[in-house]
Amino acid sequence: MRLRWVRMYHETGNAGLVCTRCGISRPTLRKWLRRYQEAGEEGLRSQSRRPLTSPNRKVSDADRATILRLRAERKGGARRIQNELRLNEQRELSLATIHKVLCEALVKPLVRPRRPAQPRRYSRPVPGDRVQMDTMKIARGVYQYTAIDDCSRFRVLAVYPRRNARNTLFFLDRVIEEMPFPIQRIQTDRGGEFFAESVQRRLMNECIKFRPIPPRSPHLNGKVERSQLTDLNEFWFHHAPTERAIDLRIEEWQFDYNWRRPHGSLGGKTPVDRIAELGEITPLAEAVEGAYDERKERIRHREWRVDKILGEHHRRASEPVFPTGATGSDAPKKRPSKK
């Protein structure tokens, strides 16, 4: 076949015609013409593609013995063995190679400890449905207040010299003013700065529900806790708490967090993008105020057990009381039993 290509080219002298009739490309024709000129018909035979030199074995017997020894002594997986080889033996081996050696030696898999049950993750459906609020001590006389929307991750930040009811009221005014949606409820831990009566009365006046979390359950306030860790790593790592313009710097950081910084939990979107995406279903302030039932709200007590007892009394006092022997529309109706 290749000899016919060469002869046809010598007869016609037209490479395009030969390629068209034989269904080959010009580089292929040039390749075999060159080989014919160098070695004649013998050069048209297919050559072996076997490598001239065999590659070295990836794992020597010494490496194999070292891997098995580290597995027996250190009880580590492939990644830990890889680190041990790199740091102590100055030997670079891939995870696949180490795993292959362990499998060939029929080494039993490691017994992994049972992981504790992970808390159930949740996210509110619309902006303003729940705002998590918390405080964090940065240094002596420097306390950061943080409020983050559960749905959109939109945040408001401020720094105060103390965490008390007075500064909580100042921060609450700022949160209500800067968040671009009405707030339905605020969730906090059981810090004393949030349980002052003046703070709770202010929330009632703004038709905002106060929902403190139970003690020893920081995972319920996980979004604000995680955002504060981001502050420590990305903001306070570069700024001293005693910096004069720290209020201005933290406002710039808040703007960057809300408008520019993409969030993995939002699929790479910014909080402002998320707010715009849910704008059509976000309730207006009039709707939030209309849904607020002041009869169900009360002053919360900081002690969890006392607060539960007070809540039960409040619930019973709020239930309608019907006179004994009431009939007709005045008596409560019983649900039909399911058979």
Image (cartoon, rainbow, N blue to C red):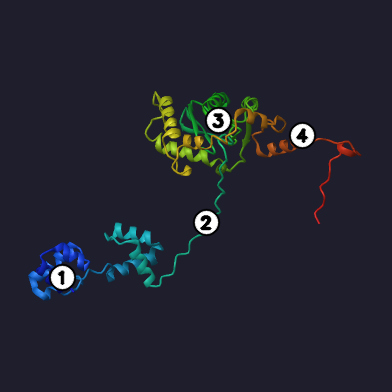
Foreground disc of the pair 2, 3: 3
Can residue 68 be seen at all in this image of the molecule? no
Q: Is residue 54 above or below residue 270?
A: below
Residue at 37% x, 72% y: name it. Answer: 104
Sequence-wise first label, 4 or 2: 2
- Mark 4 and mark 3: Cα distance apart in space: 30 Å
Q: Which residue is mark 4?
A: 318
Q: 263 or 119: nearer the eye? A: 263
Image depth: mark 4 or mark 3 in front: 3
Instruction: Determine whether the residue tagged by mark 4 lies in a helix, strand or loop.
Output: helix
Up/down of 1 relative to 244, above or below: below
Q: Nearer the viewer, mark 4 or mark 2?
A: 4
Secondary-structure class at tag 2: loop
Marks 1/4: CA distance? 100 Å
For the residues labelled 1 and 3, the Cα–Cα distance comes to 78 Å
- For label 2, the crowd category at 10 Å Cα-Cα, with few meaning under 14, some 14 to 19 and many 20 or more, is few
The mark that comes first in sequence, 2 or 1, is 1
- Residue linked to disc 1: 5
Label total for image: 4
Residue type, label 4 = Ser
Badge 4 crowding class, 10 Å Cα cut-off, few under 14, some 14 to 19, many 20 or more, is: few
Q: For mark 3, give the secondary structure.
A: loop
Mark 2 vs mark 1: give the one in front: 1
Relative placement, left or right, of 217 versus 63 is right
Q: Identify the residue under disc 2.
A: 115
Label 3 belongs to which residue? 181
| Distance from Cα at disc 2 to Cα at disc 1 | 69 Å
- Cα gap from disc 2 to disc 3, whole angstroms: 39 Å
Q: Quadrant of the image for the N terminus?
A: bottom left
